[in-house]
Image (spheres, rainbow, N blue to C red):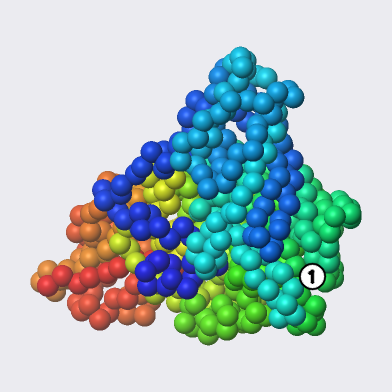
């Protein structure tokens, strides 16, 4: 939804709220730091294979220290290597083959110089030691950072949320969505009496004898950098299962009984998403919900939950229809990201609608599974109230720029419109599921998505995608009365826009095939009141010209 009209939604959507990201393309001002973060420079010509991240968290000092051992494969000769770490964090040393390396810092990037350039195709690793006081989020995840809180019993309660801001806020990595490690070992050292819950499978804990315990977790699937997290608290654990998928839950002790009731919704959600999107993409790592001191985030295999065990969004219905109060928004939305964003990942954050549009649509998919298609369409229509249509959904490439907040529900309405163009639900569900399974664990772009859905129908969807993604306004279906006959056409905004659309004429639904030329209705229509666009199925505007 629009960032200005609905700032409360930024908590769960994890948008970067910097003013630069909500300017139009022509107004956008980019810095050298934006390019260093957003572009794939020669110094980033390496493929990350593994991270071994070990970090100690001192809650009293709000201080972290540790290392990340980065295993990588060079893609070309590499004399300099860019590793990202926020400039407020200290570089203690960078070790390569037991020798310290020289480095220079520029903004939030660290440029590491090898004694001799690494040859192309070399498998190697560097061990990056670091420390410091990470940025603390004032209102996570509106702004990225660490969250240092206390629970109701006075215990430390700590979490991380850095989507948009960047994982390099708290650990060194190649901070670009185009590259995901295939395996991550996360070892968090926290004060005795506290537990750390991270991504993947629990590998054990070790009392270090100095007042700290090391909690180890291992991820065995590709994972976005911003999804790697710590969740530290006085947690209790309970578990369940769906088919062969382990469901693990970590909550504060005084919320245990509420959690056992609220988290029952996970199983019907999985049943729905398995049917519509395919098997859970990270069965090897399991599915977890962990209670957090902020509202929610889609951290892979360890979804952050802070919805206070309410239905809707903290007890409110984002659609305004009442339908949104039938389910726990955070469970459904953030879990939907496991398929869209975590499994299928956009190469550049300019294409983040691939994450957010599909996930916003997953809310309506869940409604349809539980309560039927008409309620799903009503829910989607209700969510349009927050769409701004002021800037394009797609941002600028190569400069770490997201598009507008319309990527959520305008993206969802685009998908619903495409479903309506198909006019064949069996084909639609097959195409959607084929999409999630074809690009499982892959990093793609908008063009790939466009081509996939375009191939499934005879209608040319490329102008449709272009209209909704790269232009701020939605299509306008114009009507005009000439003599005693009413005519219709598309108001031209993109070339070759000829999207079919369903309208009601005197209560009877018919399909029109407008172009940018005036066309008469096949039957006599004398008055604008005889015509009504089916706005449950299509997200368009209409106007009657005098």
Instruction: Give the side of residue 285 with respect to residue 389, left or right.
Output: right
Residue 270, percent from left and from top: 72, 65
- Residue at horizontal 74 percent and vertical 46 percent from the top: 54
Instruction: Give the side of residue 432 with respect to residue 25, left or right.
Output: right
Neighbour tally class for label 1: few under 14, some 14-19, many 20 plus, Cα within 10 Å: many
Q: Is residue 75 visible?
A: no
Figure check: 479 above or below 179: below
Image quadrant in which you'd find residue 323: bottom right
Residue 296, percent from left and from top: 61, 67
Give whichever of 458, 80 is nearer the camera: 80
Secondary element at tag 1 = loop
Residue 55, percent from left and from top: 72, 49
Give whichever of 510, 31 is nearer the camera: 31
Instruction: Give the side of residue 459 with respect to residue 306, left or right.
Output: left
Quadrant placement of the N terminus: bottom left
- Residue at horizontal 34 percent and vertical 67 percent from the top: 388
Q: Is residue 228 visible?
A: yes
Instruction: Give the side of residue 182 with respect to residue 321, left or right.
Output: right
- Residue at horizontal 27 percent and vertical 63 percent from the top: 476
**Residue under label 1:** 235
- Residue at horizontal 27 percent and vertical 64 percent from the top: 477
Quadrant placement of the C terminus: bottom left
């Amino acid at each position: 939804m629009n960032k200005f009209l609905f700032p409360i939604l930024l908590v769960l959507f994890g948008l970067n709220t910097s003013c630069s990201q909500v300017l139009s393309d022509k107004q956008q001002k980019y810095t050298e730091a934006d390019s260093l973060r957003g572009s794939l420079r020669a110094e980033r010509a390496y493929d990350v294979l593994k991270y071994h991240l070990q970090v100690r968290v001192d809650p009293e000092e709000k201080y972290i220290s540790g290392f990340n051992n980065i295993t990588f494969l060079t893609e070309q000769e590499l004399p300099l290597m860019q590793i990202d770490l926020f400039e407020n964090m200290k570089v203690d040393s960078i070790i390569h083959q037991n020798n310290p390396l020289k480095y220079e810092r520029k903004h939030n990037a660290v440029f590491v110089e090898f004694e001799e350039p690494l040859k192309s195709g070399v498998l190697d690793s560097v061990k990056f030691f670091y420390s410091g006081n990470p940025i603390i989020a004032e209102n996570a995840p509106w702004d990225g950072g660490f969250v240092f809180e206390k629970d109701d019993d006075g215990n430390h309660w700590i979490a991380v949320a850095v989507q948009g801001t960047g994982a390099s806020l708290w650990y060194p990595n190649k901070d670009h969505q185009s590259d995901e490690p295939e395996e991550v070992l996360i070892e968090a050292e926290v004060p005795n009496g506290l537990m750390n819950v991270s991504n993947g499978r629990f590998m054990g804990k070790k009392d270090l004898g100095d007042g700290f315990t090391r909690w180890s977790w291992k991820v065995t699937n590709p994972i976005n950098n911003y999804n790697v997290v710590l969740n530290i608290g006085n947690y209790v654990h309970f578990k369940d299962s769906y088919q062969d998928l382990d469901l693990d839950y970590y909550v504060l002790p005084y919320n245990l009984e509420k959690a056992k009731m609220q988290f029952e919704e996970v199983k019907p959600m999985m049943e729905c998403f398995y049917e519509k999107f395919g098997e859970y993409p990270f069965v090897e790592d399991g599915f977890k919900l962990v209670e957090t001191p902020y509202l929610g985030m889609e951290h892979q295999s360890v979804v952050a939950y802070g919805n206070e065990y309410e239905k809707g969004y903290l007890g409110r219905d984002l659609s305004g229809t009442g339908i949104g109060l039938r389910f726990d928004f955070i469970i459904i939305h953030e879990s939907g990201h496991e398929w869209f964003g975590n499994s299928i990942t956009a190469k550049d954050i300019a294409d983040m609608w691939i994450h957010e549009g599909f996930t916003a649509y997953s809310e309506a998919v869940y409604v349809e599974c539980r309560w039927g298609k008409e309620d799903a369409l009503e829910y989607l229509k209700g969510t349009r109230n927050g769409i701004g249509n002021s800037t394009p959904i797609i941002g600028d490439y190569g400069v770490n720029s997201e598009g507008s907040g319309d990527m959520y529900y305008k993206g969802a309405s685009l998908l619903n419109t495409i479903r309506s163009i198909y006019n064949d639900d069996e084909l639609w569900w097959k195409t959607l599921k084929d999409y999630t399974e074809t690009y499982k664990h892959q990093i793609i772009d908008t063009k790939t998505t466009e081509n996939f859905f375009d191939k499934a129908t005879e209608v040319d969807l490329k102008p449709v995608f272009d209209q909704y993604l790269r232009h701020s306004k939605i299509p306008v279906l114009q009507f005009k009365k000439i003599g005693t006959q009413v005519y219709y056409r598309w108001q031209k905004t993109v070339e070759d826009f000829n999207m079919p659309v369903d309208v009601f004429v005197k209560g009877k639904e018919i399909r029109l095939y407008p172009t940018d030329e005036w066309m008469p209705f096949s039957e006599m229509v004398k008055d604008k009141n005889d015509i009504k666009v089916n706005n449950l199925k299509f997200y368009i505007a209409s106007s009657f010209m005098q």
